[in-house]
């Protein structure tokens, strides 16, 4: 397993009280699995994580995209504006 650093934005940054979280990443982990693992690791934030998109290397990832330890990963919560 490798550790990956995940950048948090907006409400997630506020709720976690941090810009980044770390996660041990098994080979072949998908974007969807990454979110599911984070929800298990941080159950108090699972509701907010379930609505996020995963960005890998500055673009939105599909649920089935495999995340590698060297990737730049970010969680993007839904945004409303006016």
Image (tube, grey):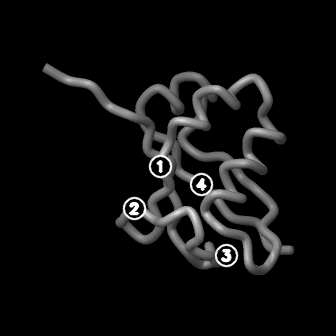
Residue located 66% across and 68% down the image: 30
Q: State the residue position of label 3.
A: 69
Per the model, the C-alpha gap separating discs 3 and 4 is 10 Å
Counting residues from the start of the chain, the first of labels 1 and 4 encountered is 4
Residue wearing tag 4: 6
Q: Position of residue 78 (x, y in %)?
A: 39, 34
The Cα atoms of the two marked residues, 2 and 3, are separated by 17 Å
Quarter of the image that includes the N terminus: bottom right
Residue 18 in the image: state x and y as whole percent.
59, 34
Reading the image, the residue beneath label 1 is: 53
Q: Earlier in the sequence, mark 2 or mark 3?
A: 2
In the picture provided, is 41 more to the left or to the right than 56? right
Sequence-wise, which precedes: disc 3 or disc 1? Answer: 1
User: Which quadrant of the structure image shows residue 27?
Assistant: bottom right
Q: Quadrant of residue 71?
A: bottom right
Left or right of 26: which side holds 54?
Answer: left
Mark 2 vs 1, N-terminal side: 1
- Above or below, 66 against 13 in this view is below
Q: CA distance from mark 3 to mark 1?
A: 18 Å
Identify the residue at image location x=60%, y=78%. Answer: 70
Which secondary structure lies at badge 2? strand
**Residue occupying image coordinates x 47% and y 49%:** 53
The disc at residue 78 is none
């Amino acid at each position: 397993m490798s550790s990956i650093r995940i950048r948090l934005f907006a409400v997630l940054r506020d709720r976690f009280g941090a810009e980044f979280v770390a996660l041990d990443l098994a080979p072949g982990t998908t974007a969807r699995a990454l979110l599911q693992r984070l929800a298990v690791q941080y159950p108090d934030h699972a509701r907010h994580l379930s609505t996020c998109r995963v960005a890998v290397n500055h673009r939105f990832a599909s649920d089935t995209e495999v995340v590698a330890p060297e990737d730049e990963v970010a969680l993007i919560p839904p945004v409303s504006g006016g």
